[in-house]
Each structure stands twice: as C-alpha cells, then as structure tokens.
Amino acid sequence: LNMGPPSRPSPARASGAMGAAAAGCLEGLAPGPPMPKTITLKYFPMAGRAEPIRLALTLGGLQFFDQRIPGQDWTDKYKPSMPYGQLPVLVVDGKTICQTKAILRYVGKLAKYNNSPLYPKDPVLAAKVDELLDAFDDLWILLAPTFLIKDQSQKEEYRQQLFAPGGVATEKLAIFERTLADSGTGFAVPQAGLSVADLMYFSFLCVIRSGFLEGLGSELLKGYPSISKHKEMVANLPAVKVYYADKKRSNPNDVPNYEVFSPGK
C-alpha cells in the first residue's frame, strides 16, 4: 500500500482544467449567431404553416420581406424553383432554408424575447420544444387527408367527427390542454419562457378555428380553458397585438380567416 504524499497534477493538466472551467463560466457570455443582412419569407397569402415563423421574426424585431405568393402563380412560376416544391421557404443572405420546423428553429435561435432566445440553448428544453412542434404535426396529419375529399358536406362532416367527443383530434387537444394546465408559468415549455412552441400553439390552433378549414368554427376551443388562456396571452403580447392591428402588414391581401388571431376573438 502506497502511503506517500499525493501526486500533484502536472502544469499542463491544471492549465487545461482551469481553461475548461473558464470556458464554462463564459458560455453564457458567448455571442449569439450572426444576424443576417437580408431575410425573405416565401409563402402563400394566408396564415397557414408560415404564421409562427412570421411571429418569431416579428417578436425578435428582425426585418424581413414577407413575400406572399398568389395561388395562381405558384405551380408554373414558383414551384419549379423551390427545393422541395413546397412552401414555406426562408432565404437568408441568399441561402435557402426549407421546411417549417427547420425554419422556425433557425429563426428561434436568432430572435429574442425579454433577452431570451425563442429556441432554448439548453438541450433538454430545446428537446421539449421540439416535442411539441412534432406533436402538432400529429394533429396536422389527421387533417391533411380531408383536403382530398371532394364532396363538401362529407369533408365538413369528417372534420367535425375528428373533433367530436371521443374523436382522434379531440384526444390531441386534450393533451395540449393538459400540457398548458400543468404549466406553472403559462408557457408551453414552462422553464423555457416564451418559445417557438408557444407560437406554434397559438398559430396552428387559431388556423383550425379561423374558418379556413370548412366545418370547423371559432367555437371549437371553448371547452379548453388553458388553451384559450394561452391564446389570449400570446395575442396580447405587445408586438403580436400591434402586428395584427396593422392589417397592411399582417394581412396585406385582405384574405378572410385572420380575425381569430386578435385578442378576444
């Protein structure tokens, strides 16, 4: 048994440990990602899947060109040049980013609200935000096939059955309601503060009750008090409230279905 004095760490090892500790202390002071010089968001003249992106850009005070492509120009003029033949697409300093959630995460890393990024740096909190973004895809997957139903009455009836008591979409809403009811802060991911998950909650649930999906009306979420409270919280954020009050900015094509995004609607 060696009872000699403990060995001292080598200068190199000690220096490395001190450097790692210093790096950890300075992590919170590290600069954020570089801000782009130009941002263009390409989507159709409606809320749809681009709305949480628009709100993230707006909340972050990021200047962007909101290019709203008319439906009649899409197939021949724009679709062939889109990487996946889909919208939304974000063009940042000439570089193209596709897919709603990828764009939303990117913008969330740039945009800050109350000095906190809309997409968390903490990996666990970021994963919880991703979890909710994916959960809303599950709801959209239920609704997407209804656009292929040609008979209007059958289409509306099918959608109503999804959200009827015991319906598959109703089960999803119950999960979203419970998530917010269990939040001690009112935010979708409590410890993250306001995040892109909240913007997805707000935007997507407003869309499905806006009249855009025929058969589903503005009363759809009346039985979900936590969802309704969350909707009002986001709608009353000063930057969001100003955005929707300025119809030339939020709805420049004057399309229907935007009223529900305002407070009290």
Image: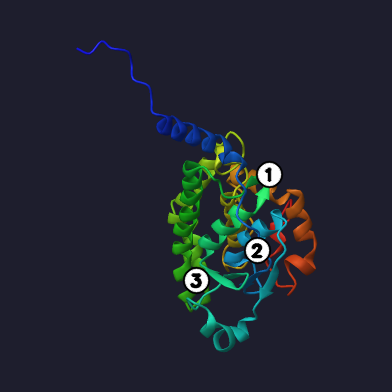
Residue 119 in view here = yes
Q: Earlier in the sequence, mark 3 or mark 2?
A: 2
Return the residue found at the far front.
Answer: 11
Taking depth in this image into account, of 70 and 149 the one nearest to the observer is 70
C-alpha distance separating marks 1 and 2: 18 Å
Residue drawn 46% across and 53% down? 135
Tell me the residue that label 1 is attached to.
115
Q: Nearer the viewer, mark 3 or mark 1?
A: 1
Residue under numbered circle 2: 36
Q: Is residue 97 left or right of residue 39?
A: left
Q: Secondary structure at mark 2?
A: loop
Q: Compared with residue 145, is residue 8 higher up or lower down, i.e. above or below?
A: above
Of tags 1 and 2, the one toward the viewer is: 2
Q: Residues within 10 Å of mark 3 (few under 14, many from 20)?
A: some
- Of the pair 247 and 159, the residue shown nearer to us: 247
Q: CA distance from mark 3 to mark 1?
A: 45 Å
- Based on the displayed image, in which of its 4 quarters is residue 204 positioned? bottom right
* Residue 137 pos. (x, y %): 47, 59
Point 52% across, 85% down: residue: 80
Q: Amino acid at mark 3?
A: Lys
Residue picked out by circle 3: 155
Element class at badge 3: helix
Work out how far the residue at label 3 is from the one at label 2, CA to CA, in angstroms: 43 Å
Q: Quadrant of the N terminus?
A: top left
Which quadrant would the C terminus be assigned to in this image? bottom right
Label 3–label 2 contact, CB within 8 A: no
Check disc 2: other Cα within 10 Å, few if <14, some if 14-19, many if 20+.
Answer: few
10 relative to 233, above or below: above
Q: Earlier in the sequence, mark 1 or mark 2?
A: 2
**In the image, what residue type sits under mark 1?**
Asn
Is residue 220 visible in the rendered image? The answer is no
In this view, 190 is above or below 218 = above
